[in-house]
Structure formats: C-alpha cells, structure tokens
Image: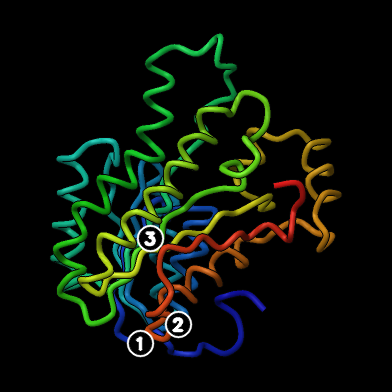
Amino acid sequence: MTATEGKHVMELQGTRALVTGAGHGIGRGIALGLAAAGADVVVHYGKSADAAARTVAEIEELGRKAIAVGADVTSTAEVNRLLDETIGFLGGLDVLVCNAGHLIGRVKVEEMTDEHFQQVVDVNLGATFRTTRAAIPHLAQSANPRIVTMSSLAAHNGGGPGSVVYAAAKAGVRGFTKGLAKELGPRGITVNSVAPGYIAETAFHQTFSTTEAQANMVAGTPIGRAGQVEDVANAVRFLALPSSGYLTGITIDIDGGTWPR
C-alpha cells in the first residue's frame, strides 16, 4: 500500500509542512505521504513548475491544502522569500523537510573545477543550512516542531565513481543534523535525517546509474529489492509525528540493509 492508497490515518491532522524539492521523485512522495496523514503542504520546486503543480493537485485530491513555490535554494534571498510565502499560506510551520539536492554530474576530483565543487556542496549541504536557518524562528512557535534532512547511503560508502563531493556533502548533512539536534533540543525542535540507498524510479538513478549498476545495487541488498519512494516517505512521516518527540539527532538508513556501508 502506498502513502496515498487505502486508509488515510490522520496522525498529522492540522500539521503545516514545507517540503523542498517536492515536485517529483522522493520529495513528491514525502509531500503526498504527509498530506495523506493530514498535513497541509507547501511544495517547493527549483525548476520543475509543472511537476510541482501536479503534486499540489494530488495533495488537494486528498483533501488537504497545498501550494507550489519556486525558489533557488542556493540563494539566501530566495530561501527567505520561500519561507515568507510558506508562512503566508500556512499561517505557521510545524515540519520542515530539506529534500532539495542533486548530484549534478559525475566528475572525478582531478577533473573537477572549483565552481563545480562549490555548486555540489551548495545545492546539497548549503541549501539544507539556508532553509533550516530561515525556518527555525517559525518552527520555534510550533507545539511539535520537526526538521528532517536528506542524507544518503553515499555518506557511508563514498558513493560511486565521480560522486566523491556529493558523498562528502551528504556526510556533511548528517553531521549538520547531529549538531543542530543538540543546538535546538532545548527549544523543543527535533532534527533527524533519512539516508536513502538505491530508490528505484527516481530521476537521480535514471540519469546517473547504469542498468548494470542498478542490478548490482539490488544484489547487494539483503532485502532483495530496490527501495521505493514510499519507503522514504514512510520514514519521514514517522519522524514528523508528535509521538516521535524523543527522537533527535538520528539518521535512519533506508537502504534494505545494503552492505558494505
């Protein structure tokens, strides 16, 4: 059963959520999963306005409020505008999911320019920092404030060829999550992360992983299958629940037990 099929348990009724990078793939699944549990959602997108509009329509079909907001998450001014529009639409913020991020391209370190390095770090770790920073004052006013960041299996195993800097940025997200959990704990804001492994049918793997590489990833998974978007969405929804309030600073690996990490 997917996050949007069958029963809709309203565990997050009235929750106000912002999901970055929510037009398609994992972000879309997270947004739909939160909506299916009762949340109203701001769907952030970078470039895919049409995809974000479709996500909004699907959320509205679930009976929840939603709006799409485009913003460049590598820009402080754009991120601040994103939060202003979010608060204007939702009236507050309870859950922030920092999903926006991208490999950009497989480039070996010896062939990488300073500009490419900075871009990879900025769109993954930098975007998480900027969005979180802008959201904290609003989350501090919530009764059940939650931050969920997006790390990766690559943070454990260094990623594949040409993805060294992406792996480093995602490892940075994990460290950022742990440190921020300590910083915000006294204010009642929990900060956790999910680290997906091979999630099938996402643009990321369709673009950057060969068919052979995808088969090898499945073969290295004890569960014996590729991950699905709903697997990640279910973990994020769990971390957003009021009942998860004593969990903070953790990373949940959504990788079917992939080994070695």
Amino acid carrying label 1: it is Gln
Other-residue count near label 2 (Cα within 10 Å), few / some / many at <14 / 14–19 / ≥20: many
* Disc 3 element: strand
- Judge left or right: residue 140 versus residue 179: left
Tag 1 or tag 3, which sits nearer the N-term?
1
- Judge left or right: residue 74 versus residue 195: left
Q: Are marks 2 and 1 in contact (CB under 8 Å)?
A: yes
* Disc 1 element: loop
* Disc 2 element: loop
* Numbered-mark total: 3
Residue occupied by mark 3:
97
Residue drawn where x is 74% and y is 59% of the image: 257
Residue occupied by mark 1:
13
Residue drawn where x is 16% and y is 66% of the image: 138
Amino acid carrying label 3: it is Val
Amino acid carrying label 2: it is Ala
Q: Which mark is residue 37?
A: 2
* Percent x, y of residue 186: 22, 71
Cα separation between marks 3 and 1: 17 Å
- Judge left or right: residue 227 versus residue 27: right
Q: Are marks 3 and 1 in contact (CB under 8 Å)?
A: no
- Judge left or right: residue 74 versus residue 116: left
* Percent x, y of residue 232: 57, 63
Tag 3 or tag 2, which sits nearer the N-term?
2
